[in-house]
């Protein structure tokens, strides 16, 4: 599916489509949020389709090969029994990436490494995470990070949050205005648990 097809299905509006396109082309990091089988990967592919004519070097890292990017500079790497996501993320930095895309965030160490990569001159990434809504996606991100961080450095965590500029949920229940929001909203509505 393309973003235009999502508009045709009334999943997003024309205005939201333009916002997403501008965010992708403007090298904003995008986190796509949703439950199992909610269409996160399909939506990520629609976002990657925006880059089809890009000259960017796009490194795509996955456990299962599902993401599709027809850009000439796209390079796909897959985890193996011996090559974990953390290994791919670390070696990706040597491949001169413009953008780093991770199919799905599942572990704290991988999440931390991706945010560090996005924060070191490699903006414009895309990833997915399992959660019910946008704020839940950020909370899940925080939970993954807390798995890896000691209490001593947990207070520094929020310095990494600005690296995610756009948060999109593929919630099966459409609520106008709740499916896409800028990271600034999450910081203004801080939630503790």
Image (cartoon, rainbow, N blue to C red):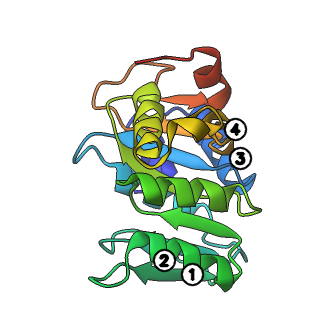
Q: Residues within 10 Å of mark 3 (few under 14, many from 20)?
A: few
Q: Quadrant of the N terminus?
A: bottom left
Kind of element beneath mark 3:
helix
Quadrant of the image occupied by residue 57: bottom right
The span from disc 1 to disc 2 (Cα, nearest Å) is 5 Å
Task: Residue 37: give x, y in percent of width and height.
Answer: 22, 48
State how far apart marks 4 and 1 are (Cα).
Answer: 24 Å
Nearest the camera: 144 or 186? 144
Q: Who is closer to the viewer here, 172 or 81?
A: 81
Callouts 1 and 2 close, C-beta under 8 Å? yes
Q: Which mark is residue 88?
A: 2
Give me the residue at 56% from left, 74% from top: 90
**Which residue is denoted by mark 4 in the rendering?**
159
What is the spatial separation of the Cα atoms under label 3 and label 4, in whole angstroms?
24 Å
Disc on the earlier residue, 4 or 1: 1
Q: Earlier in the sequence, mark 2 or mark 4?
A: 2
Residue that mark 1 sits on: 91
**Residue at point 63% right, 30% down?**
182
């Amino acid at each position: 599916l393309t973003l235009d097809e999502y508009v045709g299905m009334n999943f997003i509006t024309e205005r939201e489509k333009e916002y997403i396109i501008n965010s992708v082309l403007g090298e904003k990091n995008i986190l796509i949020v949703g439950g199992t089988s909610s269409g996160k990967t399909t939506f990520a592919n629609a976002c990657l389709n925006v880059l089809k004519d890009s000259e960017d070097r796009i490194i795509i890292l996955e456990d299962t090969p599902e993401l599709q990017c027809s850009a000439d500079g796209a390079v796909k790497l897959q985890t193996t029994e011996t090559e974990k996501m953390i290994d791919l993320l670390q070696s990706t930095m040597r491949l001169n990436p413009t953008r780093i895309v991770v199919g799905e965030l599942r572990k704290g160490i991988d999440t931390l490494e991706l945010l560090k990569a996005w924060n070191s001159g490699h903006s414009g990434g895309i990833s997915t995470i399992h959660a019910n809504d946008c704020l839940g996606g950020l909370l899940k991100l925080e939970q993954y990070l807390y798995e890896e961080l000691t209490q001593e450095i947990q207070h520094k965590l929020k310095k990494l949050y600005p690296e995610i500029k756009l948060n999109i949920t593929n919630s099966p229940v459409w609520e106008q205005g709740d499916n896409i929001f800028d990271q600034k909203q999450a910081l203004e509505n801080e939630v503790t648990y």
